[in-house]
Amino acid sequence: MKKLLYILLVIVLMAGLMSLSACDDNDNDSEDRDIETVAQAEYDTAMGAFSDARDFDTISSYLKKWAKSNKIEVEEDASSYLVLSLPATEGYEKAQSAVLQMPTGSGSSSVGCQVLSVLLTAAKTSRAHGDVKIIFTDNSEGDFSGAKKLDRKYLDTDNFINFMYENVPTVYNQGGASSYNRVTKNSYVSDSEHDKAFRVSISGLSGGYAGSTMAAETPNPLEVISGFLAAAKSDGYVFDLASFRGGVSAATIPKEASAVIVIPSSGVESLKKRFETSHKRFLKNYEETEPTAEYTLTQVNKPSGVFSDSAKDDIINLMYMLDTGSTQDKEGNTISLFNIGSVTTKNGNFEAEIALEDTAKENLADMQLSLETSCGLCHMKCDTRSNNEPWITYEESYLVSKLSDLCSTEPKSTIVQNENTIFKKRNKKLALVSFGVNISSAKRSVKVIDDFLASLISADDEEE
C-alpha cells in the first residue's frame, strides 16, 4: 500500500512539474507573440502617420505623442534631435547607462519605419535596465545635422547603439572610410547640324543605397545608358549629345536616367536596331529582379543646343572608363563601393556626384587616385566634398562582445556611412556599435536589446 502511494505521489509531482514547464513555454510563446504584435502595430502606425514625411518636425511631433501615450519622458526637444528618457528600473540604479539612437528622414520610408518600430518596441517592452536615452537625430538632408548638433553630454554614456536597417540582426563594430566627390566640366552648347532627336531613358528601377546587400543585383541606369552611347561612339555611329541626367545623391543608385541625342535622318534605322539589341540584353539581365523597369527609345523635339564633340567624348569616356560597382566578401557583405550616383547637364555644363567607400583606408586612397586620374584624362575637375575617417570599437569591449554573443554572430565591418563617424570623432573613447534590424526579425532583435540592457547590472564586474 505504501509503495502504491509513493508511486502515485511521484506521478503527481511529475505531472505538476510538466505543467509548470508547459506554462513557462506558453508564457514564452505568448511573450514572443506580444513582441511581434507590438512591433507590427508600431510599424503600421508609423507608416500611416508619416510614410511620405521626411521633415524632422513632423517625425518629432509623432514621437512626442508616442512618448506621452507610453508615459515616457521627453528629456530634450531640440530643433534637430529628440531625446526620450527611461529612468533606471528598481535595482538597476548603478547599472551601466546606454543610448539607443537612430537617424530620421533619409532613405526609404518603409526601411525607416521598420527600424523605428523595432526601437520603439524595445523601449516600451524593456524589463530591466539602467539609465537609457532614446535619441532621434535629423538626417533629412543627408548631412547628419542632428548628430552634429547633439549635445555632447549624450556621448558620455557607457554604451551607444546606433540602429540601422539590415536583412538579418547584425552587429557592426567598425565602419569604413569614404569620400564624396563632385566631378565637373564647363563647356558650351551650339546648334546641331543633325535633325532627328531621341531620348534614351530607363525608369521604374528599385534604386537604393549602393552599398546595400541588394545593390549588387541592381542596375545603375547611368551606366547602362553611358554603355549604350559608348558602344555607338566606338562603332563610329554619328550623334550629338544634348543632355544626360539622372540620380539624386552620390551613394545611391538612381531609379531613373535619360539622355537626349541628335542624329542625322540617315541614322534613325541604325539607332533603332542598336537600341533593340541593348533592350534585349537589359531584359535578359534584369527582367526578373526589376519587373517594373522600363527601357525606352522615344523621338522628341530637337533641343536648342548640343555639347561640342570634344565635350561629348570626354563625358562618355569618363562614364565608360570608371570601374564602378561594389565588392562583397564571402558572406555577401559589401566591403567596397565605387558609385556614380547622379549626373546633370545644363547650358553645356556637366556635373556628376561620385561616392567612394571601402572598409580599408588604404584601398580608398587607391580608388581616389584612380578617379582623379580618370578625370584628368577626360579634362574634368574633381573636387572632394567630404572625407570620412573609419571608426572602430574593439571586440574586447563589453558592448561588442556581449551584444555579438546575444545576437549569435561575429561583429562585422560596414561601409555604410552613418552618424557613427561623427559620434566617434566627438568622443574617441565612445563604446559604439551599429545594430542592423528589420520588422521581420523584430522579436529576435528586441530580445537581444532587452537581454543586453538587463546584463548591464554586472557589466563593470565582467570588464574587470
Image: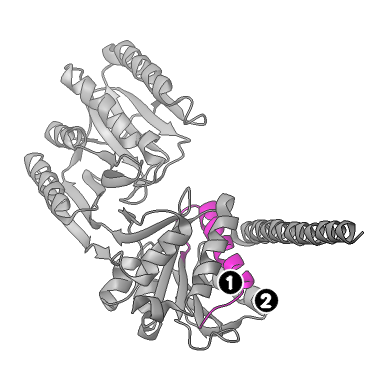
Position above or below: 373 against 259: below
Check disc 2 and report its element: helix, strand or loop.
loop
Q: Residue at x 19, y 53 (%)?
A: 360
Quick one: 180 or 237, which is closer to the camera? 180
Check disc 1 and report its element: helix, strand or loop.
helix
In this rendering, position of residue 404 left or right of residue 324: right
Quick one: 314 or 128, which is closer to the camera? 128
Q: Percent position (x, y) of residue 420?
A: 34, 67
Position above or below: 156 against 328: below
Q: Is residue 182 magenta?
A: no
Q: Quadrant of the C terminus?
A: bottom left
- Which one is closest to the eye, mark 1 or mark 2? 1
**Colouring of the image:** one colour
Can you see residue 346?
A: no
Name the mark on residue 70.
Answer: 2
Q: Residue at x 33, y 70 (%)?
A: 397
Q: Residue at x 42, y 66 (%)?
A: 402
Q: Is residue 111 magenta?
A: yes
Name the mark on residue 254.
Answer: none
Q: Tell which circle, 1 or 2, labels the residue nearer the N-terminal end.
A: 2
Q: Amino acid at mark 2?
A: Asn
Can you see residue 229?
A: yes
Determine which residue is flagged by label 1. Answer: 123
Quick one: 59 or 434, which is closer to the camera? 434
Q: Quadrant of residue 59?
A: bottom right
Q: Percent position (x, y) of residue 338?
A: 24, 44
Quick one: 132 or 345, which is closer to the camera? 132
Q: Amino acid at mark 1?
A: Ala
Measured Cα–Cα span from mark 1 to mark 2: 10 Å
Q: Quadrant of the N terminus?
A: bottom right
Give the magenta range.
Answer: 103-130
Query: Is disc 1 in contact with disc 2, using a CB cutoff of under 8 Å?
Result: yes
